[in-house]
Image: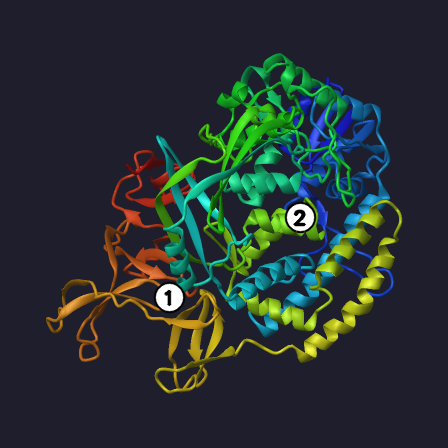
Amino acid sequence: MATHLIIVESPAKVKTIKKFLGKGYKIEASLGHIRDLPTKELGVTEGEEFLPTYVIIPGKEKVVNKLQKIAAKVENIYLAPDPDREGEAIAWHIAEVIKQKNSNFLRIQFNEITKRAVLEALNNPRSLDEKLFNSQQARRILDRLVGYKISPLLWKKVQRGLSAGRVQSVALRLLVEREKERYSFQPQEYWVFKALLKKNEHELQADLVKISNKKAKVTNEKQASELKDYLAKQQFVLHKIEQKQQKRNPKPPFITSTLQQEANIRFNFSASRTMSIAQRLYEGVDLGEKGTIALITYMRTDSVRIAPEAQKLAREWIKKTLGSEYCPPKAKKYKTKSTAQDAHEAIRPVDPTLSPEEIRAYLPADQFKLYKLIWERFIASQMTSATILATIFHIQAGKTLWQTKGEQIAFPGFLKIYSPGKIKENLLPNLTEGTNFNLEKLDIKQKFTQPPARYSEATLVKKMEELGIGRPSTYATIISTLLARKYALLEEKQLIPTELGMSVCDLLIQHFPKLLDVNFTAKMEEELDKIAIGEKDWQEVLREFAKEFYPTLKAAQKEMRSLKNGEQTEIKCSKCGNPMLVKFGKNGPFLACSNYPKCKNTSNFKRTENGEIVLIKPEEQPPKIVGKCPKCGNPVVEKKARTGARFLACSNYPKCNYTASYSTKVPCPEQGCDGELVERSTKKGKIFYACSNYPKCKFAVWNYPVAQKCPKCGFSILVKKESKARGEYLACPVKGCGYWEKIE
């Protein structure tokens, strides 16, 4: 029987760690957090102490009971959740629920799930870190106070279901302010000149860079036309050839933010998807005969530090596989930012000698892509610099100076393994200074300066990191929350604040200016870091926060204007001439007449590039004719009810009031029933299919029915479904049957 219990977070870790340890160890998973603040109340005493009340998370009772039973039967317990604040909190809460059964527990942690790392951790256990736990606890209480106090205010003033967050709202502010910068942006005209030059068989393209020894600036058509006429009379001469060698240094291995950024740029992975894939690589992947192996180190880190043994393995692989010229004489060291916690080393492959191609057959496509990215970046970080030979032709044409640039890789160095952007070699012809060119073509284009780009997930993560907002473990959650709350949309990789997001942001800035201040949020992160190292008392930090927060909250509850009746615009109602209001419905923002209920005019709208509201005229679709009216003989058309279900109606309404349900033509499967399944919708707009004999027959299904017998259980219908894994398929609606078949 096992004498030691190791408690980790996930079942995947259990499988990986079991390989390393003998029968004396029992390994169990907590399945993440087991305790948290209650969901239906604040769960924190307000005043001087801010003491939290923790409860077992609903659904985790069985996990807790199991851990308690096993804990009572073993000698030692090792708490091994992830090596960060959140992991320390999970370990702390597990200890709290099992200490009455067995108080002989210690904390262990490892940056990589390998036999060496796990055994080393078991040989060097420690007590739970109260300072680290208090740092997480302070963050949790801060976030609960902000969310629990401000969110109901937004429900009252704007719309139910909204939320405010201590860091989330500041991230929203970044998106909104960028959008407003775009609205106020005034494009400036400029003209670009390119010359196609020829000398014998050689052709090259040159860019205009200077006019009269000043940076080229052509701002209107008249200037462009005059310069074009001037250049037609000039001789283009190769005035100077400049050659220089440039060193390109490899980048450090990934940290959380840079991994999220690069995965977004290269693969269009969201921050949350990147972290989910990385978690699986960290916890362990089944590699066939090799068993379940962890492939990368811990993926929540802000440090570029590397373990010496990993550097050694990487350098040996580089020398053996690529040659000694690709391995620098001394191992490369990278400097971690002064603001980093530096609790864990950089994200790297656990075994640098395990190349992605060796294990490609065992990995799903997304896992392979991410492992390859991490592996290549790490190996490249230990390689020599690349040498690029850059050649610049300076070409004179009267008072104008032109340039054309060429690049040649003299020595690839780290580029042999990893190149953030593909370098295209561009070799210039072998010419001498004083060479005259023929002007083959002058390409002139009118352009306009562009507004600042919207944030992508990658650039928002980068900005949050630069400003000190959030931490590696929170970036993905922040972005996911903004999208889930419909404060922002993700379109063509751009994060676009919605009308709702901008209105909520404006209200929060107006009434909670300090809370929405970037510098204040960054300073609060520093305070939490100080708690973790014992320089600050966690309750003192909460008291300092509360001193300003509560009076501000009280004022906002009185003074915040309500948007429930809408925000007035300059658009006039097309029916009655009253101002139109922006309102927020369950399907998004829309315009409604301020004279409601006397005038019920509504319209969809969009904003122009400068933020002006423009009405969207609905495209009128001709009604679909499905037959003749049995009452009057006029065409019967297909219509939609307000809740979404289709129905049939006479086109001669209101003179003829004939209507009928939209039938699927599938007979009701209930025995003895002569009805057929028709389309219906719930009050909230969800479509379902029910018997036409309701309420006499109450049979109904959520998915579109098909008159096809289930080959497994014999039920008379199947239903249409769709999923990412299966695509479109037919399934039996009988509970427990489980039959399905793909729709070809």
Q: Residues within 10 Å of mark 2 (few under 14, many from 20)?
A: some
> Which one is in front, 45 or 158?
158
Whichever of callouts 1 and 2 sits on the residue coming sooner in the sequence is 2
Look at label 1 and name its amino acid. Answer: Thr
Point 39% across, 76% down: residue: 602
Number of numbered labels in the structure image:
2
Q: Would you place residue 570 above or below residue 46 in this image? A: below
Classify residue 252 by image quadrant. top right
The residue to which callout 2 is attached is 474
> Which one is in front, 653 or 59?
653
Q: Quadrant of the N terminus?
A: top right
Q: Residues within 10 Å of mark 1 (few under 14, many from 20)?
A: some
Point 32% across, 61% down: residue: 694
Classify residue 379 by image quadrant. top right
Q: Is residue 75 left or right of residue 260?
A: right
Residue 84 location (% of width, % of height): 75, 40
Residue 654 location (% of width, % of height): 21, 79
The residue to which callout 1 is attached is 643
Q: Would you place residue 28 above or below residue 136 in this image? A: above
Residue 314 location (% of width, % of height): 67, 20
Q: Which element type, helix, strand or loop, lies under badge 1?
A: loop
Q: Quadrant of the C terminus?
A: top left
Q: Would you place residue 638 above or below residue 526 in this image? A: below
